[in-house]
Amino acid sequence: MSKFDSPKIMPRYTFITILMTLVAVAVIGKTLYIMTAKRDYWMAVADRQKKDSVSVKPMRGNILSCDEQLMASTLPEYKLYMDFNALYEAKNDSLWTAKLDSICNGLHNIFPEKSAASFRRHLEEGRNKLSRHWLLWDKRVDYNTFTEVRALPVFRLPKFKSGFHTEEYNARQRPYGSLAGRTVGDMYGAKDTARFGLELSYDSILRGSNGIIHRRKVLNKFLDIMDTPPIDGADIVTTIDVNMQDLAERSLLDEMKEINAHVGVVLVMEVATGDVKAIVNMERCSDGQYREVKNHAVSDLLEPGSVFKVASIMTAIDDGVVDTAYKVNTGGGTWPMYGREMRDHNWRRGGYGVLSVSRSLEVSSNIGISRVIDQYYHNNPEKFVRGIYRLGLALDFQIPLVGSSPAKIRMPKKAPNGQWLNWSNTALPWMSIGYETQVPPISMLAYYNAIANNGKMMRPRFVKKVMKEGVTIMEFPPEVMKGYEQIAKPRTIKLMQDVLRKVVSQGLAKKAGSDLFQVAGKTGTAQMSKGAAGYKSGSVDYLLSFAGYFPADAPRYSCIVCIQKTGIPASGGQMCGPVFRNIAEGIMAKDIKLDVRDAKDTSSVLCPDVKAGNVLAADYVLSHLGIKTFADWSANNVKGSSLWGHATIKDGKAVALRRTKQYARSQMPDVHGMGARDAVYLIESRGVKVRVVGRGRVVKQSIEPGTAVKLGMHCELILES
């Protein structure tokens, strides 16, 4: 007999089947409802739970000086926001109300431009709107300011409880301020885009490559999952010498203020390599202050004036038509030239009479130079201009700065009937003395640098190499311009070197000379054209200049100084010469090595009073002065509570020295127990690259605290919750 009791089992089975069917229908119905009627709502919810293909910006590379000092670096900046919805959801409304006065007073202390009452009204407005992204302060702030705000009541809580959150940006900072600012370049802060200078020219190298992450919300927190890691930008090492740049800027500014100049330019170049060691572009602004607004050194196409005369005579000597002893009659200081009158600067005093070509350059005689060139090239001006081209003055150096332009020296062309097109009888005489041409200061300096370099034309170099994590990945070696390994015959170069020495020692450029070493160069004073208005419309503008090199017997550096001013007095030798001398003596003084023992006062038994500073440097000086030293090296704490002690002993007296915080920044800090953001900031502010492993707080760092920091070091931080 069967044990299956159908009357009892089947009703139960039927009930379960019907129940499961109803559940299935309900599930399918709910699914259809979600897929249709609630589709938009749930798609919005899904978007809040995940973010795909989120771009991660890399760290922009640094711009370094020739000795690898930071000239431009990237540091974090923050915009501060408040999420009042998060505050409400975390049920911290009562805490906010209780602490609002303290928060407003704290914000006022941090941002004194705005009163506590204004902050209170602003915050209450955001709270009434239950804004999720209410801006606390309308400007970006640096890391130190961010930490001050984060320490205020409520804000110090986690962001999901306090609502306080930030947006982080990579901000470009220049430790030396505006020094060489137009050449180093700048960024559009909001767009993180290069504006000009080396920042723009080498943007692809400095920028690096973006990474990609996707984000998933887990336990009410977003988890970042890296798909493609960002590649940080590389560093570029420039040829700029910070000390020379500072010296050039100060020397030029002092002179410009004294003579009320409009624009001033200084370029210093290393003779053997073509390295630009200093580049200054000062311009008087509407408020009377001098700033770098435009890179005049590479973009100003102006008639150079008398500094061009050297190229004119050099062409004639190289062509063999004259030599430096050739005599020319300059008359009483004026000479008719095809319906126009050529004048020398001393024409009111009767001129120079008969001069040699060498002496014509020494006293910068317009008549002497123009008569020689007109006599030998009048019937074939093309030959003269080709000679100027042969000297490299019209070369395009491909300067890596936006706005740079090669010189414009027009070439005469002959028509089929034998007439010269767009060429007058006066064009050649005036071209020979620096008019009818447009040459930027850097092209003129490169030419004088070639004379100092025995005829070898170097391409002006602004960047020496590219580095990544302390390793050189690309080099830009010194480059001789192709076809300009010798711009003139060696004899011609030697003659011009002798003449340029005489211009300074016994000519119009005596103020550029130095009692300490020989200087060679040429002055220039040119009236500036005002376009259609001509040269003498209203007040007369002048371009004053001096181009040369030093020391003349073994050239190391070449330099050009250009100043634009209105009205007289106006003299390249009198106004640019002193600037050149100050720069030259300042640069050469760096190489003067004196015996430190000469500083010892034998009549005194007092121990020197050594101030706080670099202990190793102080120890070096004291030991060379014959003062014994001893050191008490204690454990170093990055916060400065325990600093190195040091003392000197002489005649039983000791003077204690203390190591400063500034020197402590050259050592690896102790970041154990810190969060990732604080630890990374402290270490990377010392130039060390950081790799973070794990989450939570630092439990281990690969470089021991107190280790001397070197450029290119890497530190791995192990974090645990």
Image: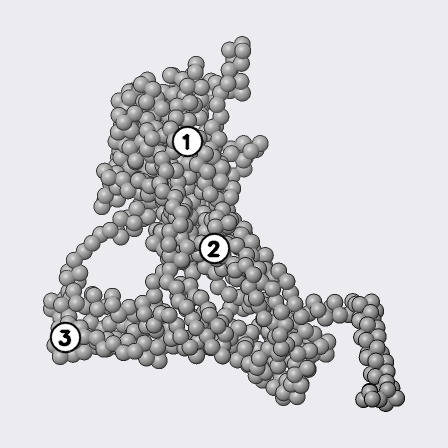
Q: Residues within 10 Å of mark 1 (few under 14, many from 20)?
A: many
Point 49% across, 40% down: residue: 404
Q: Amino acid at mark 1?
A: Leu
Quadrant of res 385: top left
The residue beneath circle 1 is: 393
Residue 652 seen anywhere in this rendered image of the structure:
yes
Residue 526 seen anywhere in this rendered image of the structure:
no
Q: Is residue 470 left or right of residue 106?
A: left
The residue beneath circle 3 is: 650
User: Which element is circle 1 on?
Assistant: loop
Q: Position of residue 654 (x, y in %)?
A: 18, 78
Q: Is residue 107 left or right of residue 616?
A: right
The residue beneath circle 2 is: 233
For the image shown, how many numbered marks are present on the structure?
Answer: 3
Quadrant of res 322: top left
Q: Earlier in the sequence, mark 2 or mark 3?
A: 2
Estimate the spatial distance between the alpha carbons at disc 3 and disc 1, rounded to whole Å: 63 Å
Point 29% across, 51% down: residue: 586
Q: Amino acid at mark 2?
A: Gly
User: Which element is circle 2 on?
Assistant: loop
Relative vertical location of residue 1 with respect to residue 592 in this rendering, above or below:
below
Q: Position of residue 52 (x, y in %)?
A: 64, 62
Q: Nearer the viewer, mark 2 or mark 1?
A: 2
Q: Residues within 10 Å of mark 3 (few under 14, many from 20)?
A: some
Q: Position of residue 64 (x, y in %)?
A: 40, 54
Q: Is residue 97 left or right of residue 676?
A: right
